[in-house]
Image (cartoon, grey):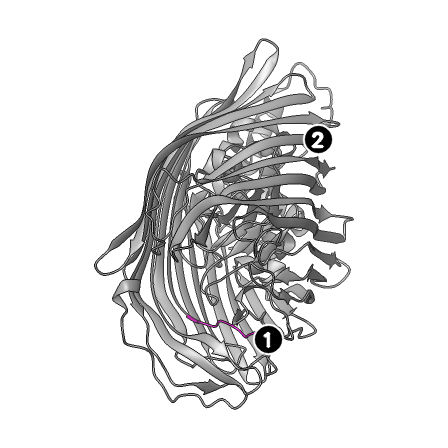
Amino acid sequence: MRAHPNGLRVGGHRHLAGKRRANLLIGAAVLLAECPSTTTIAQAQSALPPVTVEAPTQRPKPARTSEQSPRRTQTAARQRDRNPAPAAPTLSERAAAEAAAQQAAKLGYRAMPSSTTLRSGASPLDTSQAVNVVPEQVLKDQLPRNIDDALINVSGITQTNTLAGSQDAVIRRGFGDNRDGSIMRNGMPLVQGRSFNPAVESVEVLKGPASLLYGIMDPGGIVNTISKRPELYQHGSVTLLGSAFSASKTGADGLLDVTGPIGDQGLAYRFIGYGVSEDYWRNFGRHRELLVAPSLAWYGQDTTMQLNYEHREFIYPFDRGTAFNPVTKSPLAVPATRRLDEPFNNTWGTSDLIQASVEHRFNQDWKLYAGYSYNTETFSANQLRITSIDFATGAEKRSNDGTGSSLSNVSYGTSYVSGGFWLGNMRNEVVFGGDGQYRTIYRDTLIRQSTPNFNVYNPVYGLIGPGTTPSNPDSAQTDKLGQWSLFVQDTLHLTERLALVGGARYMDYDQLAGRGKPFNTNTNVSQDKVLPLGGAIFKLTDQISLYASYTQSLKPNSTIAPIGVVIDSNVAPEEGVSYETGVKFDLNKRISGTLAVYDLDKKNVQTTKTNSAGIVELHTVGRAHSRGVELDVTGRLTDSWALIGSYGYTDARVTASEDATLLGRKLQNVALNTASLYLVYDFGTALPGQLRVGGGARYVGDRPGDSTNSFFLPSYVVADIFATYETKYQNTPVIYQFNVKNLFDTVYYPSAVNNLNVAIGDARRVSLSATVKF
């Protein structure tokens, strides 16, 4: 095996000299440019975007005589025998040449969305909705630890209730929650609590109502995590990382990532193994996680098949954070490191994900995609729930709660055809298909147990153990959702510059929810709905386009808790309507971005009201409204400078409610202003190795900590820095990386459930890693 100059390993014949290997790679690059039919396999890899390689200019051949002597003919034949023509490049060599050509684009934060996000291979300039991408190289540089951390680079996104750090919980354009079905892997839904891990290559956000493509959904949009895929050239890496929050809070990570061809017929494999064990940054707790992620792919002439599997085992601290004084509106006067619960507050479990997909290209215009995904997670948790605090004396009342034998799973399948045809002089780009899913969220045993008081100013831990008393009325929490849909979308190109977009989804769904032993049904819904989409695109140039869109979303009202009435088909579902316009740009294929202005309305929001007889009644007269401006930019400024930045203005409020305490209030955990900017400088070949340094900061404005706006979480700025240095040790590429997250050790509060459950952001974390490529 021989190292590629850019650190990529190239598989090939061991007996060939290095010079000939370089010639073969150059020949492969030329072959990619000159012979489109030979690039089908390499271009089919979703991990390797298309690359254009310029063919060398052909030199004129010298004039030759029409006749040659027999002796000269024999001499030429012997010369050909001694110097045979180079063999045609193998699949591995072609894939390696293409990957090497793309390395500069990745380092420059070049961002192109996956085809699974928009259900087509359309360019962002040719779509009528905003799609923001956090590219692979950004994730490598910043080393985010969860999906919230990765999405600091995207406008208008804040965190909401993470269920004590055990769930992804992302607000987009004012709307979102944990377990709201908006987190995807390769365009297919997940139910596992944490979706981000080292098997993820990039993260994408489709903004606004996405029900046309994804069905039941909140109107803020979806987050699509893209898997790393098998590649057709042999290479791999081993990474060891050490980290520290403070002198006594340390940890270690290990990552193995290896991929390559199996035989020479287009079959490839990938294996990712990851483990982490680290101290929690507060006064007690530990995070452990194991990931095993094998995958296979076959890249045929017209067909690509993918099969990937992920198995996770985890234990996280179940940490509700701190509390805010309702009188002074300030946080509890204790060190940020002091927890208010007990060392047994943890959540632990396993998750499994299997996905399979087939993409077949019928011809240059039409292709078929079919995919299936099954995701399941089991977990249990111990928690001391804070019920009250006397902020003067420090006396804290807690309920010794827990969750046992919880199970979530989702089975999902989709199939759609995309392509184009001419109608007169107008081009139609069409995608049509269907999908179906069945999702279950089940919490078998809910623990509810009283416990002695605790003093937060003079804490004594370890006097009690986990709760053991089940509460039958609270147990067997069940939420089952089934959905079956057909959808179609057409982009009609009226001229070379102007296109109209139209589409519709027919959706049929059933939902059953309730709780208790014996079980009580609180939701029993069976309905159908047609959701439309409309838009327009006007391309000012090949690099700049204007767009406008009208989109809708739908999400049935449901509850697991008794409210005096069963939610059925007589209760209208939540519906979102969005109007959006903006400009997209992709300048010289170096820097791209979107400036969007939107107006989003959500109606039939579920509210409750106690009548004169003291009975709680359900009403769906609530209404919430969000309007805002978003700017996202990513790419290469110069040959040395790259950036990713965003700004979001989100004004989200309750505009209708029978509860006067909610009317006109800002939506919980939604910041009016968010911003981020990260810059990277690449020294290139100025040094013996390749040095890259970067850093930046994110800003989140103040946010309501509860629905009545009784207190606000203060605004914050958090800065990060990193440096990577790539060199060689005995011809083996080695990368050293140094990261500092939360550089100034800022104490900040990313989200709240109420004033007694306020999350605290991680303290300063320093890490140093070494990666060996092979």
Q: Nearer the viewer, residue 763 or 268?
A: 763
* Dot 1 amino acid type: Asn
Element type where label 1 sits in the image: loop
Q: In the rendered structure, which segment of residues is drawn in magenta?
A: 316-324
Q: Is residue 430 visible?
A: yes
Does 1 appear in magenta?
A: no
308 over 487 or under it: above or below: below
Q: Residues within 10 Å of mark 2 (few under 14, many from 20)?
A: many
Residue that badge 1 annotates: 325
Q: Nearer the viewer, residue 769 or 702?
A: 702
Q: Is residue 113 visible?
A: no
60 over 233 or under it: above or below: above
Q: Tell which circle, 2 or 1, labels the residue nearer the N-terminal end.
A: 1
Residue 17, position as x, y percentages in the image: 56, 50
Residue 533, position as x, y percentages in the image: 54, 29
Q: Nearer the viewer, residue 456 or 229?
A: 456
Residue farthest along the front direction in this orientation: 612
Q: Nearer the viewer, residue 2 or 516?
A: 516
Residue that badge 2 annotates: 546
* Dot 2 amino acid type: Leu
Residue 223, position as x, y percentages in the image: 52, 48
Residue farthest along the left direction in this orientation: 518
Which is closer to the viewer, label 2 or label 1? 1
